[in-house]
Image (cartoon, coloured by chain):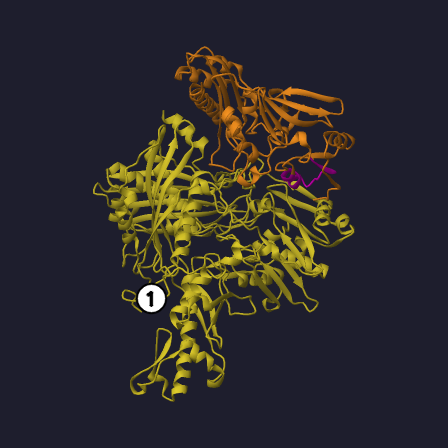
Amino acid sequence: MPQTQAYEAPRTLADAVRLLSTDGHARPLAGGTDLLVQSRATQKLPSTFVDLKRIPELVGIEVGPDGLRLGAATSAAVICEHAEARRLWPGLVEAIGLLGSTQIQGRASVGGNLCNGSPAADTTCSLIVNRARGVIAGAKGERTVEVERFTTGPGRTVLEPGDLLVALVVPRPAARTADAYLRLIPRSEMDIAAAGAAASVTLDERGVCTAARVAIGAVAPTALLVPAAADALIGSRLDDAALRRAADAASAAARPIDDKRGTAVYRKTVVGVLTRRAAGIAAERARARP
Amino acid sequence: MSTATKTFEHVGTRPIRHDGLDKVTGRANYGADYALPGMLHGYVVRSPHAHARIVSIDTSAAEAMAGVKAVVTGSDIPKTNAKLVMGEAALDLGAMGDNALAHDKALYEGHAVAAVAATSPEIASAAAEAIRVVYEPLQPVMNVDQALAPDALILHDGMVTKGRPKPDAPTRTNVALRMELTRGDLDKGFAGADVVIERTFTTPMVHQGYIEPHACVARWGEDGQVVVWTSTQGHFVVRDCCAGILGIDAARIKVIPSEIGGGFGGKIPVYLEPVAIALARKAHRPVKLVMSREDVFRASGPTSGTKIRVKLGAKKDGSFVAASASLYYEAGAYAGSPAGAGAMCAIAAYDIPNFLVEAYDIVVNRPKVAAYRAPGAPAAAFAVESVVDEVARRLGKDPIELRLQNAVREGDQAAYGPEFGPIGLREVLEAARCHPHWKAPLVPQPGRKVGRGVACGFWFNAGLNSSATVSLSADGSANVVTGNPDIGGTRVAQALMVSEELGIPVERVRPIVADTDSIGYNDVTGGSRVCYATGMAVIEAARDAQAQLRARAAKIWDVPVEQVGWERGRAIALNGASGREPLTVSELAAKLMHTGGPIIGSATVNAPMAGPAFGAHICDLEVDEDTGVSRVVRYTVVQDVGKAVHPSYVEGQMQGGASQGIGWALNEEYVYDAEGHLQNPGFLDYRMPVASDLPMIDTVIIEVANPLHPYGVRGVGEVPIVPPLAAVANAMHDATRVRFTALPLSPPRVLAALKQRG
């Protein structure tokens, strides 16, 4: 593997953006749990590793009246220990808790998981159903993008050369709202999802679903928001029949491929099962909320 | 010696292994840990094609690069017809050399075609990219059906089917061997059966998955003396293979084994060592070669994918009257699958009057298979034990009861030939039947189905050749030296044997694995033979030392040696010499230099026979019928080991074999695309079980003494991988009522079958 030329650890966002926009072969480094593995696999190192973990805006969790602001390089382990985040977004935090192993959790970040652009990324579906937006800094200033529009294909995102994902912002959930995420892996851990599904539901005081979002992963070139699945839930009491209709909508929306991780037929089927179960868990959680 | 009444003082205890602390604190040195001054780093160029003729290799650009010190290709490895005898098998050194560096054809994706040695790993890999290999790609032959097709491409011109080819067998063939075992009258046998079940099974190619990749360092001295440091299951075999492949005298090669991070049979052949020696010879510098994980999957030896047809006939009362089986095993690129061993094991557990078992060894464009824990037996047992399960269900019989009814016993002639001596199959089955697991109710979790399966397994175990020395120090401590790399806790077992014979505490016995120049010949660590055969050499060497100690006591006491006995680590006076205080080992050792000098006990063992062994496994499996995901929730291993010298490591072997077998049953498989490119050469997508996938595996040790061994040891390592494939599949049937005939039972396959069932 060729030797990398440089390692930089800027302390300001401006310095990081400058380093990334002046050298097209520089790569941002958060936890490195994808980047270093890919460098080893392809035997190609970037010209410069730009370590983001010393930039204040990139690291940390804030939960306020407006919701959650998650520094893009914050490690999964830190997020999973945040009691308030876990209470408000149980599905999202569970998804974050699925990244890698216990050791990997100490490094892996949600921002990195998103920027890696994998259709099977465990956190993406949960971010989507929670209406998360990515805050992007670039040479031309700052902008925000909905997470469902962030990835554009396997390994591809809306990030332009020199752009940097700074944070993810998630609005505070409405009353009687909760989320859930489930993935299918053949083993119990240390695996990549063959399919994944996240759901967020909002109930009125009578238990009728007034808002819902469903997203599915690993069954298309990007994670997909599935409005038809949400429509199947809205207006119902999230009974079995409604959950099954959502499952069918999710299966119908899936466009999976055959590969070493599962057949297309299999993925199309189980993404519906996961959707039904995730929506069911989200419903249980929402019913338990004041 | 009768072991029925033998009691032990040290054997059967559970001391901490001598190599344990170094391993858990990271100090143990494995294959890739060695480095020498001036050492070069090698890189192997591998074929991107599964099947191709090598038209030309241009190494000039690589050789011209700064820092490149040597480049080798197949032309540096002589073609040879030499064979290396290993027990009843023989290693084909010509094929092994061609596998190390291809001469004319690349026979699988990842086949080594050239290698570079350079002053850094980066230069070596850059130089490897500069080597221009021109291939003429050929259609790959990827499985048994393709290899047997009438228009199949032939991998090796001139291959003829050895053994007992069928009279109508084609002359141009990919079948390297056909063998058969037969007894009685098959037609008559089936005609008398009330129930006949016939099924065809398939199992995928799977890898042993040892944690440590292959790695070695080779040095070629200016005097032509060669030293190799390597991770291997048998350094004497590495020495003899390298000598035969490279055409140099074995006496000129010294092989020093490292600690070994798993082998399971896969570290018996040589891959890197001849190449490293050839590079070191050209470069006049030591050369290190290390496989990546991808290299290990693509280019070391997994075990065969198989297709097996089994037909079994039984009377209403449950007695088996006839069986036939045809076993087709993928050998990979060169002849030598374990089809024959699979055939010999297939029905070994049962007394069946009429049978025909045939086996085919078939070459395909996949890596050449290597041994994998009871090679050949697990796939055969998967097929036979699934059919036995089905017969039990058809007859409404308890599956353990049916097996007991047909189980072989002492005095029966084994299906594979010899007459069984004392064996423990019935004891194993009785223990399984009495185990709380077998009687526990099955309680599914909500939304899940749960089932229970049972299966038997058999393995021959091996004897072969071993050497050992026991040397005593003046302080009364001892060294025990053998030549078998320790992959299963054999060192501590050997130390316990010395303790038992000489009465020295086990922590004062240092067990050593010595290099090829420092101990007599030892066959490989394999065949579950080390605790048995090398253990016998250790016991005999300790007894030799003990005899010398008695002679020293006789000298001290000035009595004839016949009047000195040995008891609990002390020389004691007998008969005429009575009245003298016993002398302990330490007391005798302190006087060594005044009573005749150092003491070394030594022994060599040539053990053509071993103690065959059986196991029975019980598996509880839970299935999510909506997703096809299953999980083993309870698992029990019962096995006759003869005598457990160190019970913790015996139990560890039983648990480890079961774990590997469960992985084979549930998720492991080589996945190839249509062009023969391996799609999952890594632990992420080659799905071995992780710790959280498995329950604690219960073990029950049965000890039916092996009369060939002074303590009754049979060997333990291989039997436990034989039953799990069928035990898991039988549990899956119990849970879902679907008889799965193809492994692995991965979620997509299970869900598809459940949908078909409706």
Specify the segment rendered in magenta: A36-51
Q: Position of residue B667 (x, y in %)?
A: 46, 38
Query: Is A44 part of what is drawn in magenta?
Result: yes
Q: Nearer the viewer, residue B220 or A269?
A: A269
Residue B442 visible to the viewer: yes
The quadrant of the rendering that contains the N terminus of chain B is: bottom left
> Within the image, what quadrant is residue B448 found in?
top left
In the picture as drawn, the residue positioned furthest to the bottom comes out as B558
Looking at the image, residue B38 lies above or below residue B200 = below
Looking at the image, residue B270 lies above or below residue B448 = below
Chain A hue? orange
Label 1 crowding class (10 Å Cα cut-off): few <14, some 14-19, many 20+? Answer: some
Looking at the image, residue A178 lies above or below residue B364 = above
Chain B hue? yellow
In the picture as drawn, the residue positioned furthest to the front comes out as A65
Looking at the image, residue B269 lies above or below residue B496 = above
* Residue ID at (25%, 41%): B398
Residue B678 visible to the viewer: no
**In this image, B677 relative to B16: left or right?**
right
**In this image, B582 relative to A213: left or right?**
left
Q: Which residue is mark 1?
A: B8
Q: Position of residue B555 (x, y in %)?
A: 41, 87
**In this image, B39 relative to B514: left or right?**
right
The quadrant of the rendering that contains the C terminus of chain B is: top left
Q: Chain of mark 1?
A: B
Query: Is B515 part of what is drawn in magenta?
Result: no
In the picture as drawn, the residue positioned furthest to the left comes out as B317
Q: Nearer the viewer, residue A27 or B488?
A: A27
SS category of the residue bearing label 1: loop
Query: Identity of the amino acid at label 1?
Result: Phe
